[in-house]
Amino acid sequence: MDPIAFTRALVDIDSTTGREAEAGRWLSRQLREAGFTVVEQEVDATRFNILALAGPPTVVFSTHVDCVPPFVPARIEGDRLYGRGACDAKGILAAQVAAADRLRREGETRVGLLFVVGEERGSDGAKAANDAADQGVSEAARGCRYLVDGEPTDSRLGLATRGMLRVKLHASGRAAHSAFPELGASAIDTLIDALIELRAIDLPSDPILGRTHYTVGLIAGGVAPNVVSPSAEAEVMFRTVADGATIRQALELIERRVRIEHVLEVPPVRLTTVPGFDTAVFPFTTDIPLLDRWGTPLLFGPGSIHVAHTAEEYVSIAELHAAVDHYITIARHLLNTM
């Protein structure tokens, strides 16, 4: 199969998180036509993960179907294929399909494919795959020895990845006419004070992964410009290098100002590598910690995380072709070391 044509067709289907169903149906059809046995694992009323097998899997290639918004259709300019998901992670998905298909045609049936939904917003697909509730999925998970997860790593194998801790800070106040601020209590002011105090909190560091950092990604609050705000909230994402309990303990300092809601935690992970590849430590989070029942994890993919989630997201066509061979090399090494 042609990984470029496959990527382009998949990029042209809008699968921003929550809208993966059409892409899932297209993938299921393509994989069945290629000769794989396909299991659709329900995640919610409209979305499903895809498990494609040629036989009982020892190695599973995995990545995610969903993308961040907004939808951007595919185009090719020179050696680059542009569009939403080109490198994160539809190009990766296409390279994994091409690799598994070639191995199957050569008689290697121990390599499977697992494509999940929801990675960009909560990893609900990975959680469902790990729970392995559907018949067929649980059996595959029990037999799998290695999970090769795909994210844009510039065609390097990962040594480790940071974790993630997402929290919401909820501030409460008392509404009043803005002409009489002394009659109210501004939740926005309280939230700002908490965020300023957050800057001074000492966060964990690690000799390999570096220092924990965070982003205040969302802020909302108030009802009108002339009303003292009765409520406000901010969503904060920490990129963690240690157990999230350390950060939760540090956040106790600001709990006198705001209520803290713990939304999601994904731990940092150490990864397996194989010879012959450049390696690196990556500061982003993947589905790997949520797929721990699928075997020893590796991380590899074409494309750069620096262009993922941007308006000019792209993957090099040459790198995408090379990734097919790289995935085959990784799978053969893992199978030969058993």
Image (cartoon, helix red, strand yellow):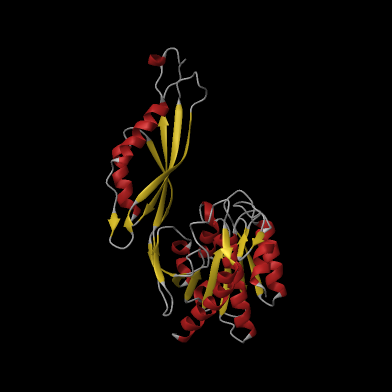
**Is 311 situated above or below 287?**
above
Left or right, 161 with reference to 39? left
Residue 136 is at least partly visible in this image: no
Quadrant containing the C terminus is: bottom left
Residue 301 lies, in percent from the top left, at 51, 68
Residue 16 lies, in percent from the top left, at 61, 52
Which residue lies at the image location 66% right of the left edge and 75% below the top edge? 37
User: In which image quadrant can residue 228 be found?
Assistant: top left
**Is 57 situated above or below 209?**
below
- Residue situated furthest top in the rendering: 179
Which residue lies at the image location 68% right of the left edge and 71% below the top edge? 31
**Is 192 situated above or below 240?**
above
User: In which image quadrant can residue 109 be found?
Assistant: bottom right
Please tell me how many numbered marks the rendered image carries.
0
Quadrant containing the N terminus is: bottom right
Which residue lies at the image location 51% right of the left edge and 77% below the top edge? 143
**Is 223 situated above or below 18?**
above
Residue 33 is at least partly visible in this image: yes
Residue 115 lies, in percent from the top left, at 58, 65
**Nearer the observer, 103 or 185:** 103
Residue 244 lies, in percent from the top left, at 35, 53
Left or right, 291 with reference to 7? left
Which residue lies at the image location 50% right of the left edge and 76% below the top edge? 144
**Nearer the observer, 162 or 145:** 162
**Nearer the observer, 319 or 113:** 319
Left or right, 215 with reference to 121? left
